Image (tube, rainbow, N blue to C red):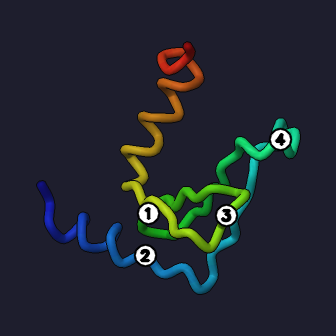
Amino acid sequence: MDRTRHADVANADLSRAVWRKSRRSNNGGECVEVADLTTSIGVRDSKNPDAGHLTFAPDTWAAFTVAVKRGRHDR
């Protein structure tokens, strides 16, 4: 593992984060918000934004979104 890159992800600066939800969100309470944190991608629960967030390396987030679009996480 590249520890330098991992450290950048773990220490993401949230001071200028712009969180967004999908346009397809219907406000049913089952949404996440995503923010581009320059060196990482932040993800948090839209109904409880102060509870914390997860942070992913951009390539990891990109791989996840491709898998979602291909239906790999459908029930």
Earlier along the polypeptide chain: callout 2 or callout 3? 2
Q: Indicate the position of residue 51 as horizontal and vertical percent values.
A: 56, 69
Earlier along the polypeptide chain: callout 1 or callout 3? 1
Residue positioned most to the right: 26
Q: Which of marks 4 and 2 is in front?
A: 4
Q: Indicate the position of residue 16 as horizontal and vertical percent values.
A: 63, 82
Left or right, 63 with reference to 51: left
Question: Label 1's element?
Answer: loop
Q: Which residue is found at the position 19% from the left and 71% from the top?
A: 4
Q: Which of marks 2 and 3 is in front?
A: 3
Q: Disc 2 and disc 3: Cα gap in Å?
A: 19 Å
Q: Which of marks 1 and 4 is in front?
A: 4
Of the 4 image quadrants, the one containing the N terminus is bottom left
Q: Indicate the position of residue 64 as horizontal and vertical percent values.
A: 45, 35
Earlier along the polypeptide chain: callout 2 or callout 1? 2
Give the class, few, some or many, for how many residues have Cα within 10 Å of label 3's Cα (few <14, many ≥20): few
Residue designated by label 1:
40
Question: In the image, is residue 61 above or below residue 42?
Answer: above
Q: Which residue is found at the position 55% from the left and 56% from the top?
A: 43
Give the class, few, some or many, for how many residues have Cα within 10 Å of label 1's Cα (few <14, many ≥20): many
